[in-house]
Amino acid sequence: MSDLIGYLITGLGIGAGFALVASGLVAIYRVTRVVNFAQGGFAVLAALLTSTLLAAGLPHGVAELGGVALGALAGLIVGVVAIGRPGTSPGTSLIVTLGLGVLAYAVEVLIWGDQPRSFPGLTGVAEVAGARLPAHYLLILAVTAPVFALMAWFFARTDLGRALTACASNRYAAQVVGIDVRRMGLLAFTIGGALGGLAGVLTTPVQQVTFDSDVTLIVNGFAAAVLGGLTRPMIALAGGLLLGVTQTLVAGYGGGAYQMEVALVLMLTVMIVQAARTGPVPETAR
Amino acid sequence: MTGAVQIDNLTVRYAGATALDDVTLAVAENEMTALIGANGAGKSTLVKALCGLIRPDSGTITVHGRLAHVPEGREMFPDMTVDDNLRLGAWRRRRRDTAPIYDLLPDLAAIRSRRAGTLSGGQQQMVAIGRALMADPEVLVIDELSLGLAPMIVTSLVGHLRNLHATRNLSVLLIEQNARLALDLCRHAYVLESGRIVLHGPAATLARDPRVTAAYLGGHVTVTP
Ligand SMILES: Nc1ncnc2c1ncn2[C@@H]1O[C@H](COP(=O)(O)OP(=O)(O)OP(=O)(O)O)[C@@H](O)[C@H]1O
Ligand SMILES: [Mg+2]
């Protein structure tokens, strides 16, 4: 019983990381209709920089903030390259983000090497209903919940959030009412970068990071985000948590080798069901 | 006298094809001006250039005051509510209160929480007009007021437009397929053919011009069996 509770909370913590990666994908897709395959890289960059800053003696909080800021900056840079030229199609931009993700490997290996890194998070052990687990998992959940609440409120209830959403809802109409669509897209990439960075700095204390950790993150993040059609943050959250829990249970009771397959199967199932329901996915859903 | 809009020698080309050729047009302050012309004449191109949505190849455009635009095809944000659509119309303004629009266009109040994509064409056109008015414009450009709408709806929209024009200082450039309606409503009119202004003057005069009556007010439609 306490095993199960331990797995559940661990799974929720890991799933929260996936959900944050997913939220970044959603923030970018909702505004630009670009699937950003460099999303996992923001988490890796942020985690690597945080490890360096902590090693250099910066206090917790400041170092993590530095990591998130680097994620945001990386997001902005990817945005400039991917959508900066007027008239770039979302498909072309997607390929550009893939390319930039690979380029990021080179930069990361050059600066940080190819060995796994980690840094301490919240230390200590928490006891929940008889299960003992690292307290850091609870911190991950405590940060993720308000971030999602804030994001849902921001997109649905603020004028800036509506203007961001308007860009993909009807790009021409957005221009008609005077919204600077390109600037909004860059803002979305910056927000996405920060969210990815947050995922990285939050999960690294319980899961060490290497330059290619982004693959796990993007596969799981995409699987979570695609549940909500890549546009709905709250469903992406549910999807991420579900994935995290399922994988932890599979690893705990079965074998650790099949974690990624869980995400892939879930993602394929969702996409097949959605395709069967709505027919071929239109290029610009209007 | 200063005009609200002054367009001089405007030329716009799309990948080589000339859509507007040396067009000069003025909209006088607090007046309604009509622009009529056949499909493909270049009316929407002129609107887009005027609203800064495409860059002209040459010519000058001067607008006095704030300009708002009711685009061809209504162009809703389909997944958003009517109220959110209206608020976005004021994106460039500080005041984004939608209440005055519901006073002005009471039909919209009843559907304020509906998603714009689920509305009828006439309702959407009303939203498009309300959204443009949210910008508190001095110049209003309407591209195809009546397109695809039932005559009764058009009559009610025209009523609203007359009211608006009477109650606030508003200069209007009206693009309209229904030439009779446009010439009735406006004081001045321009006729655009293949990218060139071929006629212009007081609407009442144009309405009697044989070239206009033949081409745009003919009323004779031959249907080949
Ligand atoms: N984006 C574009 N690319 C290339 N050609 C275009 C483009 N938009 C319009 N055109 C061409 O420019 C000409 C003028 O088009 P425009 O849309 O301005 O006509 P219009 O008078 O508004 O017609 P309608 O009454 O059908 O709305 C047409 O020949 C059209 O094919
Ligand atoms: Mg047109």
Image: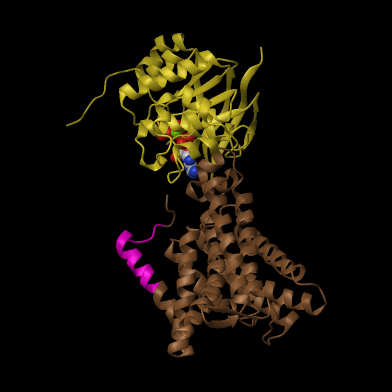
Chain colours: A brown, B yellow
In this view, the residue in front, A118 or A267, is: A118
In this view, the residue in front, B100 or A168, is: B100
Quadrant for the C terminus of chain B in the image = top left
Point out the residue furthest to the left here. B225
Question: In this picture, is B200 found above or below A200?
Answer: above
Point out the residue furthest to the right here. A57
Q: Is residue A85 visible?
A: no
Ligand 2's image quarter is top left
Q: Is residue B158 visible?
A: yes
Tell me what residue is drawn at x 64 percent, y 83 percent: A208
Q: Is residue B31 left or right of residue B116?
A: right
Q: Is residue B153 left or right of residue B61?
A: left
> Is A273 covered by the magenta stretch?
yes
Question: In this picture, is A17 found above or below B134?
Answer: below
Highlighted range, magenta: A268-282
Q: Is residue B190 left or right of residue A97?
A: left
Q: Position of residue B206 (x, y in %)?
A: 44, 12
**Residue B25 lies in quadrant:** top right
> Is A285 covered by the magenta stretch?
no
Quadrant for the N terminus of chain B in the image = top right
Q: Position of residue A21 (x, y in %)?
A: 56, 68
Question: In this picture, is B129 found above or below A207?
Answer: above
Tell me what residue is drawn at x 44 percent, y 54 percent: A284
Q: Position of residue B94 (x, y in %)?
A: 64, 34
In this view, the residue in front, A264 or A84, is: A264
The overriding secondary structure of the stretch rendered in magenta is helix
